[in-house]
Amino acid sequence: MHPSFSSMRRLLSALLGSLLVVACTPAQPTPIAKLSVAASFYPLAHFAQLIGGNHVQVTQLVPPGIEPHDYEPTPENVRTVQEADVVLYNGGEIDAWVEKTLKAMDQDIRPITKRAMDHTTARDPHVWLDPILAQDIVTDIASALIQADPDHAADYAIRKDDLLTQLKTLDAEFLSQLASCKDQAAITAHDAFGHLAKRYELNLIPIAGLSPDSEPSAKQLADLTRLAKREKVTTVFFEELASPDLSQTLASEIGAQTAVLHTLEGLTAEQVTAGVTYLSLMRENLA
């Protein structure tokens, strides 16, 4: 039995309507691929995001709230390094696993890399805590992004210059406000502030070594207590991502107050939510 004329007309009308819907539906834009940047921990990831803006997808390998000295990389971390366009790492023991991953890769597929500690001959890996060395790091990161993505070179250069201006202002604030502190001694939880102390001529005495896990012996702690009393230390600083026990014990022993001094090795989850930044924490350290 053949369909009636009216049935065929309804069928043709439905088909025509479908074609019109398809023809009038705007094509979905193809997502623009972003430059893939893997950064070992907070300061490098933060600087990369500020410079890269919307042109980059930055992955911070050490999650918020984790002390990078202690971090054990996951297989996903290793894959992220291997697949990134740009890899930013610090160097030294703090993120040695990144360098090992890069060295194991074939030279032909190795990403563009920048190493922050290339700007110092000292063993202290905490280069980002010196606003002058931080400017060198920022310049290097911008250079890596421009090399990997020359189409957006102008945007990267503008953002880099803006960040350099902010870091120069930060340096001026440190110079001004710390000028009267050169003769005052303070104790820090671990030896993270060597570059900062050298830059601004500060007398900062660490409890532990370059890693917060390198606890002093009983004799070293006794010697430190005597030194702190002799230097009339009034403040013992501790860190957010490491245990405050030693700092609190020493402060109690010498009758000093305790306070937080940010290493900026990482932010807590709460700080991330609150929008805390490198510059705001550096200014808290200065307060």
Image (tube, grey):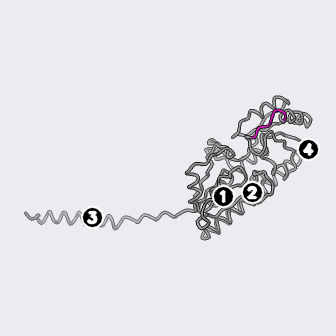
**Label 4 with label 1: CB-CB less than 8 Å:** no
Q: Residue at x 89, y 36 (%)?
A: 227
> Label 4, label 1: how many angstroms apart (C-alpha)?
37 Å
**Label 2 with label 1: CB-CB less than 8 Å:** no
> Label 2, label 1: how many angstroms apart (C-alpha)?
11 Å
Point out the tag, 4 or 3, that comes first from the N-terminus. 3
Mark 4 vs mark 3: in front:
4
- The quarter of the picture where the C terminus appears is top right
Looking at the image, the residue that sits furthest to the bottom is: 151
Q: Which residue is mark 4?
A: 183
Give the residue type that dot 4 points to: Asp
Q: Residues within 10 Å of mark 1 (few under 14, many from 20)?
A: many
Q: Residue at x 18, y 63 (%)?
A: 10
Give the number of callouts: 4
Find residue 143 and report its image quarter. Answer: bottom right
Mark carried by residue 88: 1
* Relative side of 279 to 250, left or right: left
Residues in magenta, as a range: 214-219
Point out the tag, 4 or 1, that comes first from the N-terminus. 1
Q: Which residue is mark 2?
A: 117
Q: Secondary structure at mark 1?
A: strand
Looking at the image, the residue that sits furthest to the left is: 1
Q: Which residue is mark 3?
A: 17
Give the residue type that dot 2 points to: Met
